[in-house]
């Protein structure tokens, strides 16, 4: 995954609470392979009318929104089902961070595993950021090292799990995190085998002596 340290980009507002995974990517699009690009399906029913035409007054359809890498929303973002495709849709559409007062637990975990930062702010801070982005997508800076977000003169802190922060700063997945402890793992395995040699697996080529 691509590490995140400082995002100096555009932010876009999605002023809605309880944006669930079925809204993020409606189930009817999940039959498509991801190779087609799930970004085109992101919030499809919010961004399009019943005839499939783009709704002009939706901020995500603003001409500059395609350049935004940060989305700001309200509480309980990513609630609902555990579909990881909701994260794929955001990532494939170019987003690297979602800012909200709270997230669905499974969504947040899926987000980090796909290099998407779920930045938690207070309700008040979320409203301030939404107000700052109300007219159009605007420059925003998300500093993961300092855990601060800036839009113009507005600066607010955000929180994220220390483990998730480490993963995102380094672009690590769970396997990469485990690899950071290889020396300790190898030392434990060697010590454990000395204590309990009978638990060591027998190689397939080893001769098995039957006890008649």
Image (cartoon, grey):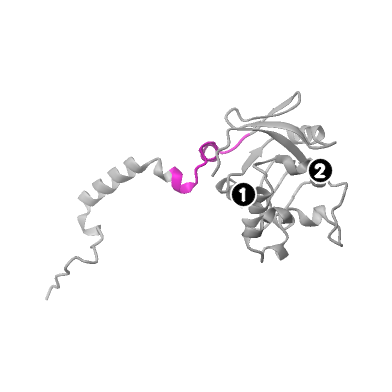
Q: x, y percentage for residue 17? A: 77, 46
Find out whether residue 8 is within the magenta segment.
no
Q: Residue at x 82, y 34 (%)?
A: 131
Q: x, y percentage for residue 3? A: 55, 38
Residue pointed to by mark 2: 63
Label number found at residue 89: none
Q: x, y percentage for residue 148? A: 65, 29
Residue 122: in sight, yes or no? Answer: no
Cα separation between marks 2 and 1: 32 Å
Return the residue found at the far top: 153
Disc with the residue nearer the chain's start (2 vs 1)? 2
SS assignment at label 2: loop
Q: Residue at x 80, y 35 (%)?
A: 133
Quadrant for the N terminus in the image: top right
Which quadrant would residue 4 be assigned to in this image? top right
Which quadrant would residue 75 be assigned to in this image? top right
Q: Residue at x 74, y 55 (%)?
A: 23
Q: Please identify the dominant SS of the magenta region.
A: helix
SS assignment at label 1: helix
| The magenta segment | 159-177
Label number found at residue 105: 1
Q: x, y percentage for residue 35? A: 62, 59
């Amino acid at each position: 995954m691509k590490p995140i340290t400082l995002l100096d980009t555009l932010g876009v507002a999605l002023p809605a609470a309880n944006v669930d995974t079925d809204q993020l990517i409606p189930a009817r699009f999940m039959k498509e392979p991801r190779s087609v690009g799930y970004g085109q399906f992101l919030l499809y029913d919010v961004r399009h009318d019943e005839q499939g035409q783009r709704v002009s007054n939706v901020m995500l359809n603003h001409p500059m929104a395609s350049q935004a890498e940060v989305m700001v929303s309200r509480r309980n973002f990513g609630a609902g089902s555990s579909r990881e495709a909701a994260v794929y849709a955001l990532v494939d559409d170019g987003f690297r961070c979602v800012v909200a007062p709270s997230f669905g637990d499974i969504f947040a975990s899926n987000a980090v595993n796909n290099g998407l930062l779920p930045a938690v702010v207070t309700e008040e801070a979320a409203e301030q950021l939404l107000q700052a982005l109300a007219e159009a997508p605007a420059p925003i800076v998300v500093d993961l090292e300092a855990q601060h977000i800036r839009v113009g003169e507005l600066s607010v802190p955000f929180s994220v799990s220390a483990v998730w922060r480490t993963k995102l700063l380094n672009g690590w997945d769970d396997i990469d995190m485990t690899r950071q402890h290889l020396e300790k793992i190898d030392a434990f395995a060697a010590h454990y085998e000395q204590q309990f040699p009978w638990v060591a697996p027998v190689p397939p080529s080893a001769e098995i002596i039957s006890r008649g």
